[in-house]
Amino acid sequence: MNRLLHNLDDTSQRIVQPPQHPHEQTQHHEEEEEEEEQCAKFYKYLHLDQQHNSHLIEDDTHDHDRTLQDEFDDGHVNDGGQQQQQQQQESEELMEGHQEEEEDTSSTHHFSILDEFSPSLKDANDDGISATSDIIKHSSRATTNSISLTKTRASIIDSIEWLGRHVPCCVLSQISHEVLYYKKGNPMEHNFRMPYAVPYEAALLFVDMSGFTKLSQSLDVESLSKTINSYFQAIVDEVTAHGGGILKFAGDAIFAEWRVCNTLNNEQSSCSDASLPSACNQAQDEENYHPQVRQKTMTMEDCVHTAAQCGAVIVQKCSDYPVYSKSISGGKGPLVSTLNVHCGLSMGKMVGIHVGNNINRREYLFLGDPIDQVAEACNSANSGELKASRKVLCYLDHLKEHYHEDDKTGLQSVLIASRQRTYFNQRNMREIKREDKVRKSSFSIHSHFNIPFDAMDLVDLECFHRLLSFYIHPVVLSDEKAHLGKYSATRDDQNDQERQRAEAELRSVFTMFLMPKIEVQLTENPEQNKKTYSQLHFIMNIVTSILDTYKGHLRQYIVDDKATFGLRGSTFPNLVSERALPCCRRIYDALRESLGIECQIGATLGKVYCGVVGGLHRHEYAVLGPSVNLSARLMNLRNHPGILVDDAVRNKVRSINFIPYPPVKAKGYTDPVPVFKPLSSKEARWGSADPKFVGRRKELNVLCDISKSVTRENNPPRIVFIWGESGSGKSSFIVQAIAKVRSVLLSMRKRIVITRNISSEGDMLVPFSLFRSIFRDVLHYRPKSDNSAPESKWDASSTRGRDWDGNSLGSGSSHRTDRSNAIVYLKEMCEEMNAPAGFLELVGRHLLGDSDYKELKAEPKLEEIISFMADVFIKSISTAEGVILALDDVQWMDSLSWKVLQCIIGRKQNLVLICASRPINHHSVTLERGFWQQLFHDLKKLAVFSEMTIGRLDASDVREMASIVLSCDPCDIDNNFCDDIFTHSGGMPYFASEILENCMKNEQYGRLGNGKIGWKEECLKNHDTLKFSNIEEMFLQRLDNLDEMTRKTLHFAVVLGMSFKFSEILDLALHMLSSKPEEHQMLEETLQKALKFAISERILDETVPDFCGAFDEQYSTITHIIIDVSECCDGKVKKCQKDFMYTFHHDTWRRVILSLLLDSYLQDIHKHAAIAIEDRLGEENTQDYGTQVKLFRHWKESANNVRAAKVALDIGRNFKLLGMNLHSIQIYQDAIEMWKKHNPPNGTKRIVGFSPQVIESLDEENLVSLVKLQTAMGQAIGSIISRSKAESAQAFETALEIIRVAPVGAKIKNRAFIFPIYSGMFFLLKYGALCNPAEQVQIELDLVDKFVKETKRHGDPVHYCRALAMQGETFHRVGRFNDAIQCHLKLREVYNADEHSARVVASYASDRCAQNFGCAANCYVRLGQIEKALEIANYIECHLMPKMDIKNVHNSAVMVYPILWIWKDQRMTERSFRVFEKYVKDPFEKYFAKDCSTPFLPAFQPTQVLLNIALYLEGKKTSLDESYFDWAMDFSNMECPMTIDISIGNFSRSPMSISAEICLELSKLTKDQEKRMILLQNGSKLAELAIGGCDGMDGNAKNITAYVQIKPVQEALQGLLNKKCCES
């Protein structure tokens, strides 16, 4: 602004003047200096006010919230000298900054200031804010002889007079005062700050017109503009003729006022803000420059009488105003519509308030009781009537007998005039100064006010023009810019009328009405009033700032705002989806977060009249039409959810989720208009707060208190479990609780992250299922780095600039949290935090759906993955003051998600975890037993854990719900009606809500004779109240009323699950209905229609998938669409349908629909659903866990056990590779249940857990599938150290027994599927899990002999080699070393590692054939052939190990374990240690974690320690780790379960024998006698245990290899121990 005025000053100096006398030149120079001095003062004022106001407006890069709240809390206005001192200090600081800025800024500083505020202001600049500057610059570029200063002034004055028609006189007076006040040189501390309020008394007339809606639909734009403004002209003329002033045009209504005036009708007659000098103190000083309106004194009685007479004339002249169309010949055509008016009159104290800023926009508001009174009076008046508030009567009561009163109505207004007669005695018109000649050829802005242009120079006029433009609509400014410089002295009314009509248009406009929920009544408390003014001021600035950002326009501000998109200068592609609707959300959130103000927004889209409305000399820019009326109607609806839109908006924004609300009747619409609430992405996934929610106050308060504590410093985590039956409303309770908690924490101004997840039944089988949504929610909160992914512009640098709870209910996050950005953010954090191997592959692909990761590059350590996931979560929200995780239906959550939560709980303070579940006696939670016990015992005592049960509502709660649904007072509802609802719903909230909605839909209720609301009389007579005995019957009735296609669509939907995508149900329908390609488009449209109808019936809810664009993003984008290229002849892709997500409104609907379907029909649908998924998987090459689990479930429910088993085996194998053996077992058990679920006939026993009929009916495919599942489960159980090996043995034995008893078992020729059973059982024999010790040797020999013969007959070298290796291992263990070597030699003739190793691993999990080489080396040692043993050891290291999978650590350990001790005994310990580290220790640390350990793990630490000691004793190491002594002195470190010790000892040395030798060697190395004694005791005990496992004394065969290695150690330990005892 300063630079602009500086440019103006320079321009005025550059204007070439005629030659002057030297004295005249000196005088002119002095005048210029005086003008510059006055301009400089004005520069300071404008600069100071810009700086003061600009911080009030939300900016893309500034944290406005704190400033707004601080100033609001302080009331914005200080008192007395303190304020002046503060302002003076602020002025000096700002002026210093201004001087520095001017040195660096360019000549276009004016534009840069505006552009920094908001990019959208550039349009406003172009539209005329600096329009006068354009004139002056144009003047400077012209030649000296062509432009004169006089013409420039005339052009500016002409523009001011034109723009001045759009504002009331009081605004012109205010601007004149501002300009001239500073021209006189008044001190800067008295600058005009917003809000600026002026109290006054007046009579207020409200004229409301009707008929425009129909008119706008019948006439062309030119005729419409002419008709509207002709009608308005008649009304404006009457107001002006009666000495009134037009305050506002509110759509098709007018506010007019008659102010009480004692001396001067002066805008500055009094002031509520100390920042302005009062008239009483400076009236004399201002006399020379203050604009005045000199007229006789007007008392309140004068004002009331004049306004009443004006209103009476208007209803007489303007009622039944006919409007005709044009005939073809141009004459009068048929009658189109009739326009009418009805008026209201009131009087009293009012306040005029100027709000806004000195940057881009101001508005003039007026408050006071007369506004409410005049609204009530007008609303109660019929067409052609004038009603007045009863306060008006006291000024007319001396003629009271003439009034037409009707006290029976109970209204506060009285009819005082109609089109036929006037009910009050009108004063003699001579008493009232009336201007009969309103229209003048020479126009001055308003007939009773003149701007003192003569007192203003060129710079003053420029400032006046600029300040005036702040009050004008941008479209008007744009039009005026086009006319600037075209001043004509012959300008007349006819030209002005033509200009009005030329600028009018009909166009499709998005209209938004906004009503802040604030108290705007004036009080007797000045401080309270000041706070009200400040609130209105801040609302104005926030709304205009956001509108500017989204390129919208503010139409007007009358306590509630009206904004538009789609007018000239505000039209863009995807206007509704990318600008208008996100703008609504942003305004809604900004008011809540910055000022704590709730608001109601109604938004519509439709064709409206856009143009000037009013008289020729007083008018405003407006938009009129049915959609505008509807927008206001939506804004004022009861039980408003915050934002409501019409169907036209919904259809334009298919990327956003909407939920339907009851249709409304609106003016201009024949049928009830569908209404919708747009949802944020989180609301779409979670649901939104239910306006019908009742009860639960105690539970809500408890949860709110817990959540409030989350922000206390170092507050420990809190865990709350909420239990509730289906239908009890636990999900609604969580949503409601979050909304309340959010509101409370917002009021506390806390930075909180709130996120929620809803688990589904299939999630139990999907690892880390919880974090699919949680990661998307929290990743955008991560601390930003310089190279972070681009974010939306609302992600300001300040913390309050971020919507900390933005992803919670009702809050729009402006951050892009879709799938692609989440993956980018995750990659950044993985690089920064050094993610463990396999993390990105697992989380990026299987949780966030990144197809870049096709397979795991490294086998992950599960423990590290869990820990890192917790770290990512904690770091992402590290700058928040608290975190609330709300998890619904946790009974379906997988165990790994619980483990991550356990980590988070253990590491994160200021966390509240809310878990909702169905009762635990019906559904178990997959929590680890230890953590579960910790919750219910230790943490409960510490008040960290708490639980609550959500039960049924009581009768009073149901009554309250009924009152909300029926929009009445609870006391107005009949008891019988409430009792029926309560009885049939059982007090379950959802059921009660559905019953009430059903009653409303069927119109079964009404007013009874006693005035109560209850069942209609005809319903009672016909017993037609509730036709059902339970909620299921009611749902059945509603389903029966659906059309066939909708029912069929719902049949498909229930099969797909509680939630499904449109693409899924479309694929299923295409497969089920076998439609022809040319019919696909029609089927798609039919399906959409059926789904839409199901949504309207509240059976389904429509949502957008997590990764799609969402309402709370600034620019909504769709990243997942269905593509149809079949009919794209040009080769371009055609986007057909966005892939929406649909969810059943409640699981009762799904349960009821499922109960209706025949099993065969259900199975058929499941079969086609599975085929559709397989087709899609083949195209997309996607194998994420969620999709695989869906595929398995569909095949399972289709009764295709073979296909389901195949998928289950694939899933289990993948889980096992990740070390997730528990998940593998779970999927195998689920698959086996397909055969187990069939119950045997009464009196018939099961065979190995299955019905005899099932066993007898097994065909070859089913038998093989079942046996493979049993075998895989046995292998998975055997891989878990914590699980009993007897469980694994039971699985293998069951598999063999199934083969034996099934009739088809003996007929199967390809018996390769049996071989893994033998391998597994052989493995378990070594643990003693299959039989007692006395029987073990013979059973083992018989088992391997059968296995060898079976595999030899089969002919597959892989299985034959495995059988030979198993037989050789058995011979070795029982001491038949020569037989073992013969087996090995046979194996070497067949086995080729290059050809067979991978196949052996695929069948037996590790290369059992290659492992036989180590066994053979042991046999050669026992036979004394050391050289041959060393030869085999070298072959293993150099030829076999390089060909093995380094990640298969168990395989490597078994292969190298025997040769480690052979090398050690030959003093080749260095080689042993190198091979052990290379193939066992290092790979295990790299690829595995503790909870997915190999069976050889107990031997790892003892082996490493003993080899290190041996190296030290051989002189290969210079020092010994002292920690070995501490480790060995703790017996628990070395003790090993006997079964594991025996099993490992079968390969060579047992773990406890190694530990015993460690104790022996360390006892020799220590001089500490106490340590030595402990080591000898520990070693002796370990040696005794190790010998007991291999000496055969327990009935098992003697393991000679293990025995001969431990026996010398045991004897040495015993000897030293005896010697030590003798010495003591």
Image: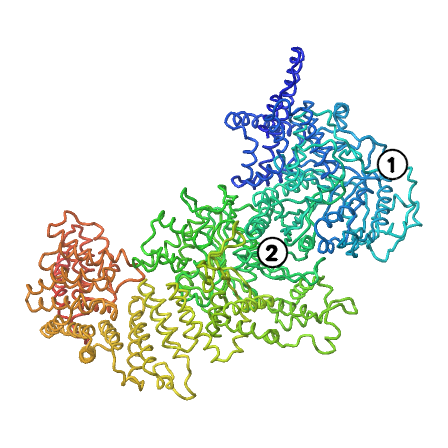
Q: Is residue 345 left or right of residue 1589?
A: right
Q: In which quarter of the image is the N terminus?
A: top right
The residue at 43%/55% (across/down) is 905
Quadrant housing residue 1269: bottom left
In the rendering, which numbered label is found on residue 1103? none
Q: Residues within 10 Å of mark 1 (few under 14, many from 20)?
A: few
Pick the front one: 1183 or 691: 1183
In the rendering, which numbered label is found on residue 433? 1
Q: Is residue 176 left or right of residue 806?
A: right
Residue 923, given in percent of the width and then of the height, sits at 47, 70
Mark positioned earlier in the residue sequence (1 or 2): 1
Does 564 appear above or below 1551?
A: above
In the rendering, which numbered label is found on residue 649? 2
Which element is circle 2 on? helix
Amino acid bearing label 2: Val
Residue 463, given in percent of the width and then of the height, sits at 65, 29
Residue 790, given in percent of the width and then of the height, sits at 45, 46
Q: Is residue 745 left or right of residue 1491?
A: right
Does 46 appear above or below 1112?
A: above
Amino acid bearing label 1: Lys
The residue at 17%/61% (across/down) is 1441
> Given contact means CB atoms under 8 Å apart, are the residues at marks 1 and 2 in contact?
no
Quadrant housing residue 1285: bottom left
